[in-house]
Each structure stands twice: as structure tokens, then as C-alpha cells.
Amino acid sequence: MRLAEERKLAGEKRLAKPKRVAKAKTFKKSQEVAKARRDIKNIRGVHKVVLDAGHGGRDPGALGSNGLKEKDVVLDIAKRVKKILEARGGYDIRFTRDRDKYLSLEKRTVISNKHDAELFVSIHANANPSSRVRGLETYFLNFASNEQAMKVAARENRISLKRMKKARSEQEVILASLQLQNNRDESLKLANFVQDSMVYSMRKYSRIKDLGVKQALFYVLFGAEMPSVLVEVSYITNPEEAKRLKSSNYRESLAKGIASGVKKYFDSIHPEHKIAMRQ
Ligand SMILES: [Zn+2]
């Protein structure tokens, strides 16, 4: 969604109160229908997940001093996550992009909603002007909790921090009554599983910094009709992490961690599948 459209939406919300109630009801109904459809699909315990490799094509994302591009690293990690989950069985993994292709943020959400997936996981690598900054973090969609989270969101959304702050105040109007509320708790749960599993999976490496679960406004997550998170796998601007991101072992460990977080999330909501698979 572009800023102009958001402004329009925010304006509509303020002006037409009865319409908003009607819209919210319709929305709730469509959410229920979508959930029922997903539940039916889950009878066999096959979980559909959309993996979104950040950036792509003319948008390289963040750049490492070693020449590494965020768009390449995250696509490779996404492919590894797919392989791991599908090898486990019970997963149907879709991509927003499976090659070096430019995709707008809006298009990514449209793709994920079209797949009618249960979860949306966007994979990114972090950047900071200071090469000393390092660590792994996972975001879910909400108001930015601090200046640093807002900076990350501004970069990933490819807008200035000033515009990000302005967007935040506009978004507050929209977010108060929209689908965000429906998915926020589930997204937070998913974010915690992914973050914890990822950090655990990296325990064999020294100096792994767990930056925890954070909240910020990511346009790529806005409008997604399912619980969704954005993972920042490491800082590509930190020389040691950039070097590690270049190695397939490190990428594989990250992918294992993300995959394990997704699995734990499903185990928590469908314990019967976990039992069935054990037998
Ligand atoms: Zn990114």
C-alpha cells in the first residue's frame, strides 16, 4: 500500500463511521471464512506457508563490505527453509519470488493472500551504519516500539525515517480497527518461536547476539491475511556476520532455526498433528 492510499484510507475511516463498522463486520466474516477454509485444508495436516525472500532484482537490499547482497543471501536461506520443511513432510511451501526478481511490497502481500497460506515469513538481513552492530531479531507488525526498530522498518520499507514516522501516525488510525488486531497475537507467538529456534540453532557459533522479538510497521506485513513475521537473520554490515552469511553452513543453520520455529508454532496450535506424526 502506498502512502497516498493509506492517507485516503485513514481519511475514509475518520469521515464514514457507520461504513467502517460495516466494513469491519465484513472483514471479520471474511477472516472467519478464510480460517474455516484453512481448517478444512488442515484435516490432513498439510500446512501452507509463504516464504518471502526480501528485495530482489533492481533492489539489492543491504550490502556487505564483502560484496554480499541481501537479496541473494535471503533467497538462498528461503530455499533452504523450504527444503527442510518439505523434507519433514506435512508442508506446502510457496515463495513470493524464487529467483532474482524485483517485487513491490504490495505485490508480495497479494501473492501471499492469493496462496491462502496459514503463515507468512519474510526473510531479510539487517544493516547499520556502525559495522559493530550485530545480532538476530524477529519482527511482527505493530507500532514501532523504539527509534531503532523504526529505522530498520524505514530501511526495509525503502522510505525515509521522517516519512516512516509520519506513516506511523497515519497507520495508527487504520491499525486500531483492522485485521492487525486479529493476527497480532498469533504473529507474536510465531515471532517468539522463530526467534528462539533461530538463536538456539546458532548456538555453535560464538558471539551470536539475540536481539529478541520486536515490533514495527513493515509494509510487507501490512495487509497479510495470516499471522506474519519478518526475520532479520544477521547484520550484513558487520564484517564477521557478513563473512558467516557467505558460508553455506551458517545459512543452513539459520534455515534450520527458522524451519524449527515454524514447526513449533504449528505444533502449538495443532498438538494432534504432533502426536500423529510421532506414532
Ligand atoms: Zn531487507
Image (cartoon, rainbow, N blue to C red):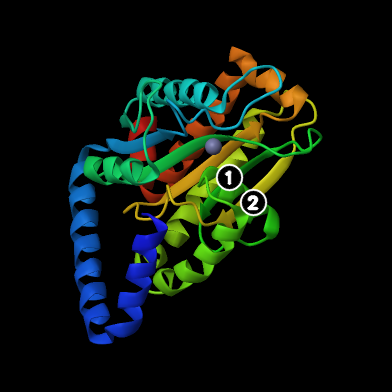
Where is residue 180? Give x, y as percent: 40, 63
Where is residue 254? Give x, y as percent: 58, 27
Instruction: Say above or below: 225 vs 276.
Output: below
- What residue is shown with label 1? 155
Mark pair 1, 2: CA separation? 6 Å
Where is residue 107? Give x, y as percent: 31, 42
**Quadrant in the picture for residue 196:** top right
Ligand 1 visible in quadrant: top right
Mark 1 C-beta to ligand 1 under 8 Å: yes
Q: Which mark is residue 151?
A: 2
Q: Evaluate if marks 1 and 2 touch, with contact meaning CB atoms under 8 Å apart.
A: yes
> Quick one: label 1, few (<14), some, or many (20+) residues within 10 Å?
some
Q: Amino acid at mark 2?
A: Lys
Mark 2 C-beta to ligand 1 under 8 Å: no
In the picture, measured across the screen, residue 257 lies left or right of residue 181, that is right
Instruction: Say above or below: 2 vs 101.
Output: below
The residue located at (18%, 51%) in the rendering is 37
**Quadrant in the picture for residue 207:** top right
The residue located at (51%, 44%) in the rendering is 230
Is residue 279 visible to us here?
no
Q: Element type at marker 1?
A: helix
The residue located at (64%, 21%) in the rendering is 245
Q: Amino acid at mark 1?
A: Arg
The residue located at (34%, 33%) in the rendering is 96
**Quadrant in the picture for residue 246:** top right
Residue extending farthest to the top is 248
The quarter of the picture where the N terminus appears is bottom left
Q: Element type at marker 2?
A: helix
> Quick one: label 2, few (<14), some, or many (20+) residues within 10 Å?
many
Where is residue 69? Give x, y as percent: 57, 23
Nearest to the observer: residue 118 or residue 7: 7
Is residue 250 visible to us here?
yes
